[in-house]
Image: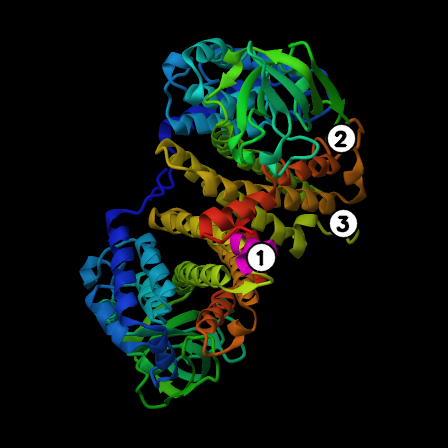
Amino acid sequence: MDFSLSFVQAQLKESTRRMLGDRLSTQQIREAEESADGFPRAVWEEGIQLGWSGISLPEEFGGGGCSLLDMCVLVEETGRGGATLPLVVSSGMAATILERSPRSGHRDRCLSEIAAGKIVCPALIDEQGRNEWDEVRLPITAEGQLSGKKILVPFASVADELLVTAVTPDGDTTIVVVDPNSEGVSITRHHAKVGVPMFAVEFNDVPVPVEKMIHRGEGARTALHAGLQTGSLLATAEAVGLCEALIKMSAEYVTVREAFGQPIGAFQAVAHPCADMRINTDTVRLLLHEAAWLVDNGREALEEIASTKALANEFFERLANDAFRVHGAIGYSNEYDLQLYTRRLQGFCQTLGETQESLERAAVALGI
Amino acid sequence: MNFEYPKEAVAFRAELRAFLDQEIPSWWTNLFAHDDRIIPFTLELCSKLAAKGWLTMAWPKEHGGGDADIWHQNVVREEMWRYGEPRGPQYMNLNYIGPAIMMFGTDEQKERYIKPMAAGEVIWCQGFSEPDAGSDLASIRTRAEDTGSGFKINGQKIWTSYAAHAEHCFLMARTNPDAPKHKGLSMFLVDMDTPGVTVRPIESMGGPVELHEVFFDDAEIAYDALLGPLDQGWKVAMSALEGERAGVGYAGLYGSQLARLLRFAKETQDGTGRRVSQRPDARGKLVRLRALNRALRLLMYKVVANQAGDGSVLVESAIYKTLAGDMSMQIAHLAMDVAGPKGFLLEKDPMVTLGDGAYTWWTHALPVQVAVGSSEIQRNIIAQRGLGLPRG
């Protein structure tokens, strides 16, 4: 039983924090969000050089061969730095789905590309669906034609490939790779402000060649779920980082801001929610790391992963709110930096599993 | 990072469970029940544990310990709390009173007091809180006056657990009323049969045997009862309290409660014929609390690991204790909800639920939020010492 960071993890943490401290000011976060790409591409490019995009991909694909737990440490730092990057969706989820899929030319090539910094976006949520865990509805014909719409696809406009879930006429889940520049694919940006650029992707009779059908059937569902589980853990790690940023901002603010003759942090009504931020963030981090460790060691962790997400949602929704409340009105203004983090943190709570649904998934895993 | 519990300690856990399954009588529920058999049984069990070298495993050999590693000692802590703490009041000796004497005591004090603790033969009580001083511990008024031949104690302590059974008291008193309040306090090791010491039980929701008032009327003690330097008792006490907070194996207790609650939810049907475990609210709360208990256990392991590294565990133990206090109520409230009005029935009633009754879970959960430093004080510690927030 050992809670210390490994050498690799300590390095990742320190170098990432330093890089983002130098390269990504809050002004740059704002500019990136408003930009056409919707994310800080320069930081992403530099991150690729540092090995971020392939960090936990197998070495045979040019990855770093690091563990999921190592990647959680990295992503906590990018979260803390307010960096919205395709790490979780591409290097995390898409890579996991592909790794669990049968070996093939396209599949292997995709993995190498992800390691090299290409962006592969999972397109999961159907127009008539609700969230990423929902049953797949987008139809793919027997001849391999996609027609329909996926929504709320993060980073689609900068994707090199889309990893799309669809269902065959006989009800098999399929996972296919689609070039976003192909004929019949149209991408429209959603109006949303949770920090991540999101897009609706419409497929108009888009043909999918057989070799781009990465997986099919029960195995595809398993691969998809593995991707969702990995994604949920990495998203949680990123959110832990956002929490640390909010705790830091809140502690600094309430130490300096005065009212009724003293710093407001001396009032328990302000100090105690701050204490809860620390308790709740540390609680989730421990559960997250244990769950990632279980996955890395080949152990079943379905109940752990789902209940960690549920607790993270519950605690972090409240943390975002308490960070706002201890700031008062200034936390509402756009000019002040708090909103950069609170919007992203609230967005986490409904990404890859809301609270009640995650609890139900944990209950099913428990067998009750 | 490694979340694997050390293999030898895992094997020891199985051995300890087998021993406890054999030794613990069928009438036993936990330390806080109403039963005259409890204290004598705990003394007997502690002697047996001491004979097996399991009572003070991680203490240094010279003090009757086994120099065992912290993970074995932690197994004992967890398992004992899982079984409702059959070591009885002596768990306090192990958690913090013994360690305080080992850290701050003279050789003579260690010789006199540590051996009986290691043998599992002696009950101590803690003399800290007073009617006018609980959370604001530094403002205590019990006075220890230097008489020229020793100290004379006058004052009153309250909420003193097990005082009627204790041989000794780990007492905090004021030795210098002119110094700033934190700097005029001293710790003493007082024999409870000293003339002038009177114990009166306090009836409480938790039962008649637990809490007491202890009165000191011109109780005279020798100089060698002083533990640590004169007027520096605050430091001794704070070090002791850190150990006390971290030392209670709440996760073991709650794990046992949650396992029983899960079974109960599966067996109990509500008015619609549905099993309670099939209701979304109950299902959600059960898995949520299971997750929180995993976190609580990991927090305890983290404190244990830091303690071994001699790091301060002030903030971590405050986080641990606060979470435990919140959880104790959440578990109790869920138990009451799952049981419904049948949950009101007490242990003696043949239709009692969950072994000792959901209502009893509730009465035992309440004090976790206020004892050994209330959740409010813990949050102050986390805010001020953990986050650097200013004091008022």
What amino acid type is highlighted by mark number 1?
Answer: Glu
Q: Work out whether residue A156 can be spotted.
A: no
Q: Which residue is mark 3?
A: B270
Please state which amino acid type lies under the numbered disc 2: Ser
Asked whether the residues under the numbered discs 2 and 1 touch, taking CB atoms below 8 Å apart as contact, a structural biologist would say no
Check disc 3 and give the amino acid type: Asp
Towards the viewer: A248 or A238: A248
Closer to the camera: disc 2 or disc 3?
Answer: 2
What is the secondary structure assignment of the residue under circle 3?
loop
Identify the magenta region: A262-275
Q: Residues within 10 Å of mark 2 (few under 14, many from 20)?
A: few
Q: Position of residue A13 (x, y in %)?
A: 29, 56
> Which mark, by number, is residue A360?
1
Q: Nearer the viewer, mark 2 or mark 1?
A: 2
Q: Compared with residue B49, is residue A325 higher up or lower down, i.e. above or below? A: below
Q: Is residue B256 magenta?
A: no
Instruction: Using the image, name the chain to which the residue with label 2 belongs.
Output: B
Q: Distance from label 3 to label 1 (Cα)?
A: 19 Å
Q: Position of residue B293 (x, y in %)?
A: 53, 43
Q: Marks 2 and 1, how far apart in space?
A: 39 Å
Near-viewer residue (B5 or A195): A195
Alpha carbon separation for disc pair 2 and 3: 33 Å
Can residue A175 be seen at all in this image of the molecule?
Answer: yes
- Judge by depth and name the residue closer to the eye, A235 or B322: B322
B128 horizontally vs A145: left or right: right
Identify the image's colour scheme: rainbow, by chain, secondary structure or one colour: rainbow
The kind of secondary structure the magenta stretch mainly shows is helix
Query: Badge 2 is on which residue?
Result: B204
Considering only vertical position in the picture, is B303 above or below B177? below
